[in-house]
Image (cartoon, rainbow, N blue to C red):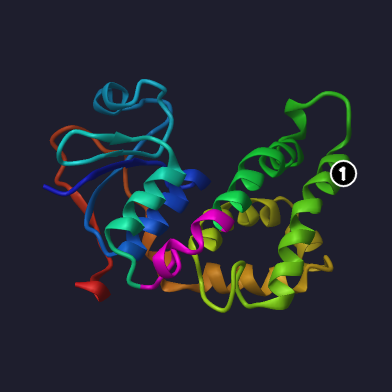
Amino acid sequence: MPPVLYSFRRCPYAMRARLALYASGLAIELREVALSNKPESMLAASPKGSVPVLVLPDGRVIDESWEIMLWALRQHDPDGWLGKNGAYIDAATALVIENDTTFKVYLDRYKYPDRCQGNPPTDYRIQAEIFLRDLENRLGASPCLLGDTLSIADAGIFPFIRQFADVDKNRFAQSPYVSLQHWLKDMLNAERFDAVMRKYPPWRPGDIPIIMANKALD
C-alpha cells in the first residue's frame, strides 16, 4: 500500500510536496481535495484541515509541506536535491523560511488587495521584491538557487514565485529579474511540473486509486 497524499492542485504548498515526491520516485496515492468539501478521512488524519497531508502506510501523518519534501527525498534522492550528505538542507531551510514567512505575507497582500485595507498593492509588491532581488542575485551567480543543479530549495520556492509572476505577467516579464525569469521558465517547462499538475476530479471514498509516480525512475 503506497502513502496517501491529500492535495489541492493549485495550492503552492501541495505543489512543492508533489514535486519532491515525484523527484524521489516514490509511488503515492494522490487524492485531490475540494477545499469546500474536505474528506472526513483527511480531517481525521490532520484536523487542521489544510493540504498537503501525507499518510504513511504505518499510519504516521506528515501535514507540513516542507516536512513532506524532506521525508520523500530522505527515502530516495536520485537527483541529489538534498546535496551530498544533506549539504543543501540548512541553506534551503533558511530560504524556505524566508519564503514562507515574510515573502508569503507580502505576496498574499499583493495578490489579494481587496482583503487588505490601507496600503495599495504596489506597496506590497515592492516589499515582496526584496526577496526576489536576493533570488536574482543568487541566480545571476549560478543556474539554480544553491548551485549548478536543482535542489530542494528550487522546488520549495518555485510555486510561490509562479504565483507572484501570475499576478501581473506583463510587469514581471518587464522586470529587471532576468535570471529569475529564465529560472521560472525552466521550472515551468520541465516534465516534472506537467506530471504533478495533471487535473483530477475531487477524490471520494470508493474511487479507483490514482497513483502518481515518476515512471522514468521505475
Residue 96's place in the image compared with 43, above or below, is below
Q: Position of residue 89 (x, y in %)?
A: 49, 57
Q: Nearer the viewer, residue 89 or 7?
A: 89
Q: Is residue 70 magenta?
A: no
Circle 1 crowding by C-alpha within 10 Å: few under 14, some 14–19, many from 20:
few
**Residue beneath label 1, please?**
122
Q: Position of residue 163 (x, y in %)?
A: 63, 51
User: Which quarter of the figure is the C terminus placed in?
Assistant: bottom left
Amino acid under label 1? Answer: Thr
Residue at (66, 41) in percent of width and height: 104
Q: Nearer the viewer, residue 108 or 46?
A: 46
Residue 111: quadrant of the picture: top right
Residue 142's place in the image compared with 159, above or below, is below
Q: Is residue 71 visible?
A: yes
Q: Position of residue 82 (x, y in %)?
A: 44, 63
Taking the image as shown, residue 115 lies to the left or right of residue 12, namely: right
Q: Is residue 197 visible?
A: no
Residue at (62, 67) in percent of width and height: 145
Query: Total marks drawn?
Result: 1
Q: Nearer the viewer, residue 181 or 210?
A: 181
Q: Is residue 84 magenta?
A: yes
Residue at (37, 46) in percent of width and height: 68
Residue 21: quadrant of the picture: bottom left
The stretch of residues the image draws in magenta is 79-91
Q: Nearer the viewer, residue 148 or 89?
A: 89
Q: Position of residue 167 (x, y in %)?
A: 71, 50
User: Which secondary structure, mark 1?
Assistant: helix
Taking the image as shown, residue 28 lies to the left or right of residue 68, namely: left
Residue 154's place in the image compared with 12, above or below, is below
Taking the image as shown, residue 115 lies to the left or right of residue 25, namely: right
Taking the image as shown, residue 205 lies to the left or right of residue 92, namely: left
